[in-house]
Image (cartoon, rainbow, N blue to C red):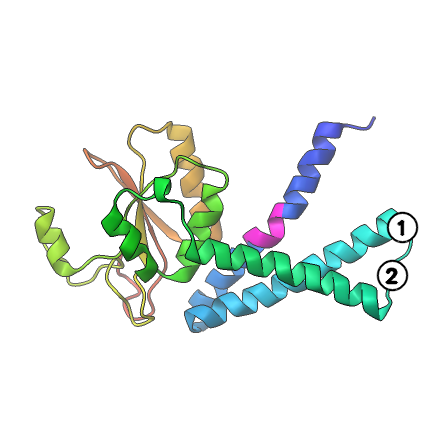
Amino acid sequence: MFNPFSFILKILLLVILPFIGLIRLSVYFHIQHNLLPWVCIALATLMTIVLLFIYLTFLHAWVTDYAGNTRYTVKRRFGISSFVVLLYVIHGIFYIGGTNIKSEDIRTEIREVHPILRLSVSTLIHLDKELLITDSARLPEDYQKMGLPSKNQSLHYIQSTGFAHAIDIRTKNRPEWKNQLVRAYFIAMGFKTLRHTGTADHLHISLMSHTYPSAR
């Protein structure tokens, strides 16, 4: 028997998977090959465009019973795939809504966070509108201002890539199942996660630094 709910769920998964794969591939290129940040994203973007092109080719064939392998239809599908993926990447890296950032200072600092990490967070915000970034790039003296001992190594510091490799996400006053789903998402994408509890309960998300592999 045809199940519309199951059909819609499968379609949604098929639509979402290429973009989730883009983030995972970017993280893979960073961790395994230590490529420049923009090179990691560019390679993953190109692969996602090809995957979306294949999607559109199968969809076109399914709807029309004809693959449409003329030069015009191929260019059109490739153009649509490129536009959609590039729009997603550019929007995800360079725009995070103000309601999802704790303060104006952090809004300025978020530009200093690794673009792969920014892309992963902005993607999650589409599903979790209440997600709040509470910290991003830091300087050693910032720990002293918070009444904490300074750290020699912290992924909140600017790394050799030219970006900070960590952000903090608020977990306080949020349902625990949401916190666990957020953590599972970042782990699945290849990031490291640490739960810091207390009055400033938050989830520390980080991308490995090749300069300081053990830093957090």
**Residue 152 or residue 87, whichever sits in front:** 87
* Along the line of sight, the residue nearer the viewer: 75 or 32: 75
Rendered location of residue 202, percent (x, y): 28, 40
Relative depth, front residue between 69 and 169: 69
Quarter of the view holding residue 86: bottom right
Residue 17 counted in the magenta span = yes
Q: Please provide the residue range marked out in magenta.
A: 16-20
How far across and down, in percent of the image, does residue 12 sit? 65, 40
Do residues under tags 1 and 2 come within 8 Å of each other at their CB atoms? yes
At label 2, which amino acid type do we have? Gly
Seen in the image, is 159 located left or right of residue 183? left
Which quarter of the figure is the N terminus placed in? Answer: top right
In this view of the protein, can residue 187 be seen by the observer?
A: no
Which label is found at residue 104? none
Q: Is residue 134 left or right of residue 145?
A: right
Q: Is residue 142 left or right of residue 191?
A: left
- Type of secondary structure dominating the magenta stretch: helix
Query: Can you name the residue that lies furthest to the right here?
Result: 65
Q: Which structural element holds mark 2?
A: loop
| Residue 58 among those drawn in magenta | no
Does residue 204 show up?
A: yes
Identify which amino acid the numbered label 1 is placed on: Thr
| Other residues around mark 2 within 10 Å, as few (<14) / some (14–19) / many (≥20) | few
Q: Which residue is mark 1?
A: 64
Quadrant in which residue 166 is drawn: bottom left
Which residue: 23% across, 62% down? 157
| 2 versus 140 height, above or below | above
**In the rendered image, the vertical position of residue 101 relative to residue 212, given as above or below:** above
Corner quadrant of residue 182: top left
Residue under pointer 2: 68
